[in-house]
């Protein structure tokens, strides 16, 4: 078991183009489950493949423990990888798939057998050991892919969107299984996903990437509560945070015609005081249509989730806004409601740079 | 049913079978067409079997069936030796073709190196060159290497002719293999040669079977190359032997038919054994 450290690691696919991974510096302590999350093209998979040795680093260094693995072949890095498509060997049985890497290493037959049986037991694959992958369900294949990584007892697990081929229900149960398995084995895991719910629920820490650049690394709730810029604010959380144009005024931020008081010091205002005000759907309160101090919103769509609901509406000035509506009595589509800000839940970002103020 | 409520009895029963779309005319037309095609395909075989069971005089003047032609074939044509020769030439050539085409196909599909696409285009171009146009210079070359009196010359020719298409087929097939499976091999500690041998090759059995069948039929049935490059009578293949039989002053048609049947049988057997792979292999890489 080991820590993982990226030091200014870069990957450039074509000269003159934006790097796929741009000077990534990230330290993952021993035994941590770190999730790399971002939209497609953000460089998260490339970063993982660089760690695995499937992509060379064009700059910077990568360490596993104290070892500089930047130029080492994948097999010398002592890592295991689970691929999005599982990449099982179709011509081998489950048992052969599980033990293949060990046989390549010329491990004694007895030891291979013991480890394969242990992993199969752990993942409830024992009845399927003699089957070929094509005779397994999606969830079972996924577990074989996991088992193939586990038997190697590697220092680091690399997971490349391992749940995206599963159906929604299985994905939820498997994601808790993976997280608890990781905790039980205590192995460092780097987990790539584009699904921010997966990132929030699984990771000890979450690293958000965008266009090859690391935006923020933090514990999931810190990321949610204190996004460092507009991108992270908009990416983490579902439904997404409302991001509205605003203006710095003496006692707060003016947004959608109302002044929301901000108690903390926001630093020096920009050139014209333009800011982006961010507020999550639960940071807004529904109120009566003409209550003083509220913003009038026309309801366009209501999403009912059972325990609560989300109201999607439009403000007079054209901005779209999402409000969480607790309970089951939601305003009807087409009606006019008032919306009130909760000042403590307001995020303020610089209007130009997008950085948090 | 009362008050507009739907009761359980009103609901249709559970659906247990998929609804069949009946198009009787299309079905019988197809069946009729198949029968016609079947007759057209099978008639030559019927003709061969029927003719081979007549003597030359009963073939020319009408009369009953006999085994005279089969006896004549046995005494005039060393068909056992020639079947062995055909088998040796076929297997050696296909062995070379499979070795070259799988390795080349894997390299074209999965490895990146300078000039790869130019070489690939050159190989595709080689498929388009008719054998007849290169057979004379090739004959001169092989004669100069003194390879006309052994299997070697013919085997080299068959391999050279068969490899481009086989390489093309293998390249297409290997392109359809997901990269992740090969990367899993890299992670598991394999080198590229061992990935090829232990992962890619076992996964390409359908394509190998396709190439085997196509090449077997082509080489087994070939006359031109065998006639030119197998100068030693004891090394003649069965098709060359039959050709020699027909080249005499008079041709005994029933004996020739008997010989043709002997010659056709192995190719048919190979085809029947491997046909289920054939369709898979030929369509590989087209869909998902």
Image (cartoon, rainbow, N blue to C red):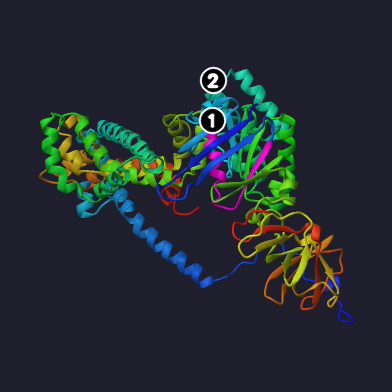
Judge by depth and name the residue closer to the eye, B201 or A103: A103
Question: Residue B259, image x and y in percent?
Answer: 26, 42
Residue B267, relative to residue A265: is it above or below?
above
Judge by depth and name the residue closer to the eye, B64 or A224: A224
Judge by depth and name the residue closer to the eye, A317 or A170: A317
Q: Quickly name the residue at label 2.
A: A106
Residue A3, relative to residue A304: is it above or below?
above
Q: Chain of mark 2?
A: A
| Residue A99 lies in the magenta-colored region | no
Highlighted magenta segment, given as a residue range? A33-53
Within-10-Å neighbours for mark 1: few <14, some 14–19, many 20+: many
Disc number at residue B55? Answer: none
Residue at (24% x, 43% y) in the render = B222
Q: Is residue B67 visible?
A: no
Q: Nearer the viewer, mark 2 or mark 1?
A: 1
Q: Quickly name the residue at label 1.
A: B188
Judge by depth and name the residue closer to the eye, B157 or A155: A155
């Amino acid at each position: 078991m080991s820590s993982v450290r990226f030091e200014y690691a870069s990957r450039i696919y074509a000269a003159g183009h934006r790097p796929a991974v741009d000077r990534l510096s990230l330290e993952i302590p021993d035994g941590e489950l770190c999730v790399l999350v971002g939209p497609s093209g953000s460089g998260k998979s490339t970063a993982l493949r660089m760690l695995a040795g499937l992509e060379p680093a064009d700059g910077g260094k990568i360490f596993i423990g104290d070892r500089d693995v930047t130029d080492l072949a994948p097999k010398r890095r002592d890592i295991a990888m689970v691929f999005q498509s599982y990449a099982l060997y179709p011509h081998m049985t489950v048992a052969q798939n599980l033990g293949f890497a060990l046989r390549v290493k010329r491990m004694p037959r007895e030891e291979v057998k013991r480890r394969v049986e242990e992993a199969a037991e752990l993942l409830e694959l024992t009845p399927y050991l003699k089957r070929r992958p094509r005779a397994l369900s999606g969830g079972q294949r996924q577990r074989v892919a996991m088992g193939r990584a586990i038997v190697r007892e590697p220092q680091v697990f690399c997971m490349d969107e391992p749940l995206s081929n599963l159906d929604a229900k299985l994905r939820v149960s498997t994601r808790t299984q993976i997280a608890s398995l990781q905790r039980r084995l205590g192995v460092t895991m780097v987990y790539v996903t584009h699904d921010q719910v997966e990132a929030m629920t699984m990771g000890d820490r979450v690293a958000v990437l965008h266009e090859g650049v690391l935006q923020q690394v933090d514990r999931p709730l810190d990321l949610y509560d204190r996004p460092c810029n507009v991108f992270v604010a908009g990416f983490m959380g579902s439904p997404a945070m409302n991001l509205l144009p605003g203006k710095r005024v003496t006692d707060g931020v003016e947004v959608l015609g109302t002044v929301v008081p901000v108690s903390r010091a926001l630093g020096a205002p920009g050139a014209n005081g333009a800011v982006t005000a961010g507020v999550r759907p639960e940071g807004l309160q529904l109120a009566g249509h003409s209550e003083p101090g509220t913003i009038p919103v026309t309801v366009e769509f209501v999403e009912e989730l059972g325990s609560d609901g989300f109201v999607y509406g439009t403000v007079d000035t054209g901005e779209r806004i999402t409000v969480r509506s607790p309970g089951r009595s939601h305003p009807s589509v087409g009606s006019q409601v008032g919306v009130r800000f909760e000042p403590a839940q307001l995020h303020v970002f610089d209007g130009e740079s997008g950085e948090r103020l | 049913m009362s008050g507009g409520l739907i009761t359980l009895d009103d609901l249709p029963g559970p659906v247990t079978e998929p609804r069949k779309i009946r198009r009787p005319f299309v079905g019988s037309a197809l069946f009729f067409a198949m029968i016609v095609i079947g007759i057209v395909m099978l008639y030559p075989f019927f003709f061969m079997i029927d003719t081979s069971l007549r003597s030359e005089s009963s073939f020319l003047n009408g009369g009953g069936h006999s085994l005279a032609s089969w006896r004549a074939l046995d005494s005039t044509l060393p068909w056992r030796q020639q079947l062995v020769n055909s088998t040796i030439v076929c297997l050696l050539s296909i062995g070379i073709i499979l070795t070259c085409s799988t390795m080349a196909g894997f390299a074209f599909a999965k490895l990146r190196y300078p000039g790869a696409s130019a070489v690939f285009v050159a190989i595709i171009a080689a498929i388009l060159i008719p054998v007849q146009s290169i057979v004379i210079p090739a004959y001169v070359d092989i004669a100069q290497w003194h390879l006309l009196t052994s299997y070697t010359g013919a085997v080299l020719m068959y391999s050279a002719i068969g490899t481009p298409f086989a390489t093309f087929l293998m390249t297409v097939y290997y392109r359809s293999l997901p990269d992740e499976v090969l990367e899993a091999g890299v992670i598991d500690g394999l080198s590229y040669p061992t990935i090829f041998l232990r992962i890619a090759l076992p996964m390409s059995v359908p394509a190998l079977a396709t190439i085997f069948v196509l090449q077997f039929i082509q080489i087994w049935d070939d006359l031109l190359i065998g006639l030119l490059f197998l100068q030693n009578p004891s090394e003649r293949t069965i098709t060359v032997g039959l050709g020699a039989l027909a080249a005499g002053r008079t041709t005994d048609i029933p004996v020739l038919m008997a010989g043709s049947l002997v010659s056709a049988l192995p190719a048919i057997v190979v085809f029947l054994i491997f046909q289920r792979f054939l369709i898979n292999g030929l369509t590989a890489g087209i869909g998902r």
